[in-house]
Amino acid sequence: MADANMQSFEQRVGRINKRRTKMARGVVENVVNKDGLIETKVRRHGPRFPWRGLFLSCLVFFALKGLLLAHLGQGTYDSRVEKLKAGTVFEQVGGWAMHADPITQYAADTIRTYIR
């Protein structure tokens, strides 16, 4: 019985010391509970994927493709994409990325109403 209590005590002391060292390094955040009590908690630290940046990059990419399609017109745009698809491996990847998909068509139709 004493060993089990001592082991759980050591585990609790280890968790407290780990939390104190993280708080001393400055990775903390203050959280207000439902009852108004302010607690200082250790912020979860680790690698995170930048989902917002990826989403905004895709949004800008499709908007620029739509702008190109609206400005050049369907025929010219398709002929330039076909030239890319007939080129080197890198140009073929660019041609695949720049093909006129439904999102690009919708963006081009929306932009076309404003530029003409």
Image (tube, helix red, strand yellow):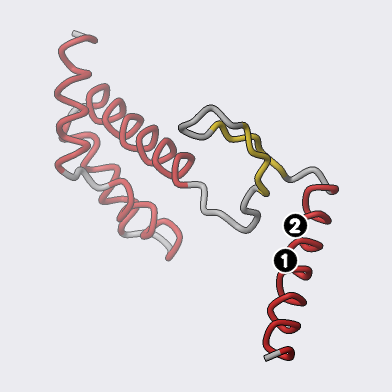
Residue at 77%, 77% in the rendered image: 10
Please state the horizontal and vertical placement of residue 30, each as a whole percent of the image.
65, 34
Residue at 65%, 45% in the rendered image: 41
Looking at the picture, does residue 70 appear above or below residue 91? above
Please state the horizontal and vertical placement of residue 98, each as a whole percent of the image.
31, 46
**Residue 101 picture quarter:** top left
Residue 19's disc is 2
Please state the horizontal and vertical placement of residue 6, each as a whole percent of the image.
75, 83
Looking at the picture, does residue 61 appear above or below residue 84? above
Looking at the rendering, in which quadrant would you find the N terminus?
Answer: bottom right
The amino acid on which the numbered mark 2 sits, given as a three-letter code, is: Arg
Task: Classify residue 81 as left or right of residue 94.
Answer: left
Marks 1/2: CA–CA distance: 6 Å
Looking at the picture, does residue 62 appear above or below residue 110? below
Do the residues bearing badges 1 and 2 touch, measured as CB atoms within 8 Å? yes
Residue at the disc numbered 1: 15
Task: Classify residue 45 as left or right of residue 26.
Answer: left
The amino acid on which the numbered mark 1 sits, given as a three-letter code, is: Arg
Looking at the picture, does residue 65 appear above or below residue 43? above
Please state the horizontal and vertical placement of residue 15, each as a whole percent of the image.
72, 66
